Amino acid sequence: MPGDIPIGEAFTNIIWYVGELAFRLVPGTILSLSQNINDPVAGPVPSGIGPIAEPVTTESVVTYLERISTPEQYSSLVHNWEMYVAYVMALSLVLLTIVIYCSIRVRQLRYWERKQFEAAAQTVVAEDVPRTILRWKRIIEQVSSDNEQNWRLAILEADIMLSELLDREGHKGDTIADKLKNVDRASFNTIDFAWEGHKVRNRIAHEGASMHLTDREVRRVIHLYERVFREFGIIE
């Protein structure tokens, strides 16, 4: 728009104004108001201005600046002051936004650090729970595929989970069959499901690819293991 000041010139004027305000006008005003002497920088003190005898107000400082400045100087100062305030307000908003963003990010980092420390402080048993859930989800994905080899792997992996469960419950034995024989049925309601699933697993291990599996049979066997795992809280 016509009459607009280029950004480069505006910043130059702001820097000039800050320098005038900080190194010329403010020191000269304070010195003149407090000592009632001729300021070699700001010039002679106008008549009627003496040492400070009462609190100085903003209005009195503005009046003083107007009286010691030429009309051109005062007009330039007022104009640049408005520009200075506008740019400072814009810069302050940007800096405030950055401060708020940094504060939020720091809080988020502290939150994740606290979570990591809490996770590191957990026991091995507590860490096994999510890992077991991930393993079970992988088994379900294999069962849902159309690949018969994936079905075999799903049953084999489920049987490994059964072996780990028996170890956790304190059942001793060299094989899963030995561990199942030592189980007290009163504390293992799904023992028959575990036996049936394990027998299918043994057939897969012995017969390999020659053993034909159907989608229905695989889902039935995995459901047997699921009943066992749910009884002991391995999966939900």
Image: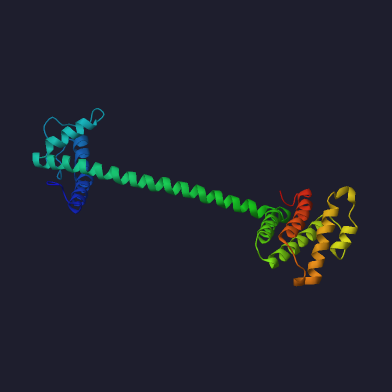
- Image position of 227 with respect to 210: above or below: above
Residue 215: image quadrant is: bottom right
Residue 201 percent location from the top left of the image: 79, 64
Picture quadrant where residue 164 is located: bottom right
Q: Give coordinates of residue 156: x percent, y percent.
A: 75, 64
What residue occupies the far left of the structure in this picture? 71
Q: Horizontal placement of 88 versus 218: left or right?
A: left
Residue 146 spot, x, y in % from top left: 65, 63
Q: Looking at the image, which residue is at 72% across and 51% down?
A: 235
Q: Nearer the viewer, residue 166 or 41?
A: 166
Q: Is residue 45 visible?
A: no
Q: Position of residue 226 (x, y in %)?
A: 75, 53
74 to 171, vertically: above or below: above
What's the coloring here?
Answer: rainbow
Residue 90 visible to the viewer? yes
Place residue 89 in its image quadrant.
top left
Near-viewer residue (142 or 9): 142
Q: Give the number of marks.
A: 0
Instruction: Determine the residue positioned at 23% across, 45% down.
Output: 22
Q: Nearer the viewer, residue 100 or 61?
A: 100
